[in-house]
Image (tube, rainbow, N blue to C red):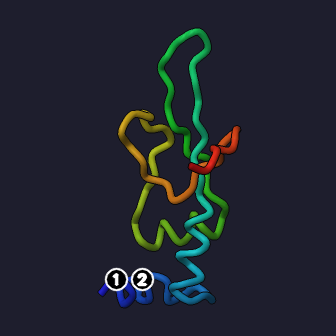
Amino acid sequence: MIIRRLRRAWKNFDLTVEEGLAQLTTICSMEVTIKGQKASCQKIPRPRQQSHELLEALQIKLPEVLPSRNIRVVTRKKLAVRRKSQ
């Protein structure tokens, strides 16, 4: 059902559902810490034009900022420091 809905929503784009999903997985968040405070939030930058058009076709609007505690809505997160493998 999901693939059929995506195909219908993206019928005017010259890409497959898999390519569209791959395009949307490049949307990342940036952790923003307020100087001198412990509070931080996740900032979601404005998506590239094609990603924006794909989201519009699906009628999805991303928030600009999210609290960083216990909320994760992005597919990838760029880390300033690489984590050590356990």
The residue to which callout 2 is attached is 6
Along the horizontal axis of the image, is 55 left or right of 45? left
Along the horizontal axis of the image, is 23 left or right of 42? right
Say which amino acid is labelled 2: Leu
Query: Foreground mark, 2 or 1?
Result: 1
User: Residue 70: horizontal and vertical position, in percent?
Assistant: 36, 39
Residue drawn where x is 51% and y is 85% of the image? 17
Along the horizontal axis of the image, is 63 left or right of 18? left
Residue drawn where x is 41% and y is 62% of the image? 60
Q: Secondary structure at mark 2?
A: helix
Residue drawn where x is 44% and y is 38% of the image? 66
CB contact under 8 Å: marks 2 and 1: yes
User: Residue 29: horizontal and vertical position, in percent?
Assistant: 57, 46
Compared to 1, does 71 lie above or below? above
User: Residue 12: horizontal and vertical position, in percent?
Assistant: 54, 87
Point out the image quarter for the N terminus: bottom left
Say which amino acid is labelled 1: Ile
The residue to which callout 1 is attached is 2
Along the horizontal axis of the image, is 51 left or right of 82? left
User: Residue 36: horizontal and vertical position, in percent?
Assistant: 59, 9
Compared to 84, does 47 lie above or below? below
